[in-house]
Image (cartoon, rainbow, N blue to C red):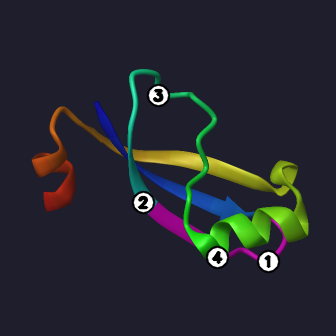
Amino acid sequence: MYIIYKTTNLINGKIYVGQHKTDIKEDGYLGSGKLLRLAILKYGINNFIREILATCDTRKSADML
């Protein structure tokens, strides 16, 4: 399955939106973008939350969202 997610920095309110392929919805994945990784290092992983916005069966359907 593919998920469309939103990761929010609880300190400054910045959001990061992406998609992720997984078998487990709550796998703890926050994202892999360079800016997000740097923000996690700066603010700490505990200051981020992920919300699942949508789930899709195929990458093609996830790309359409």
Which residue is at a point 77% across and 71% down the rendered structure image? 39
In the picture of the structure, the residue carrying the numbered disc 3 is 25
Q: Is residue 30 left or right of residue 47?
A: left
Nearer mark to the viewer, of 2 and 4: 4
Q: Which numbered disc, 1 or 2, marks the residue that appears first in the sequence?
A: 1
Which residue is at a point 51% across and 57% down the rendered structure image? 6
**Residue 16 part of the magenta-drawn span:** yes
In the picture of the structure, the residue carrying the numbered disc 4 is 35
In whole angstroms, how far apart are the C-alphas of marks 4 and 1?
14 Å
- Say the numbered circle drawn on residue 18: 2
- Say the numbered circle drawn on residue 54: none
Please, what secondary structure does the residue beneath circle 2 have?
A: strand
Disc 3 packing (10 Å; few <14; some 14–19; many ≥20)? some
Disc 2 packing (10 Å; few <14; some 14–19; many ≥20)? some
In whole angstroms, how far apart are the C-alphas of marks 4 and 3?
23 Å
In the picture of the structure, the residue carrying the numbered disc 1 is 12
In whole angstroms, how far apart are the C-alphas of marks 2 and 4?
13 Å
Disc 4 packing (10 Å; few <14; some 14–19; many ≥20)? few
Q: Which residue, as the protein is rendered here, is positioned at the far top?
A: 24
Q: Where is residue 27 in the image (x, y as percent from the top left)?
A: 57, 29
Give whichever of 29, 52 is nearer the camera: 29
- When asked about the image quadrant of residue 44, the answer is bottom right
Q: What residue type is labelled 3?
A: Lys
Q: What residue type is labelled 1?
A: Asn
Q: Which numbered disc, 2 or 4, marks the residue that appears first in the sequence?
A: 2
Q: What residue type is labelled 4?
A: Leu
**Residue 52 part of the magenta-drawn span:** no
Q: In this view, does 28 lie to the left or right of 10?
A: left
Please, what secondary structure does the residue beneath circle 4 have?
A: helix
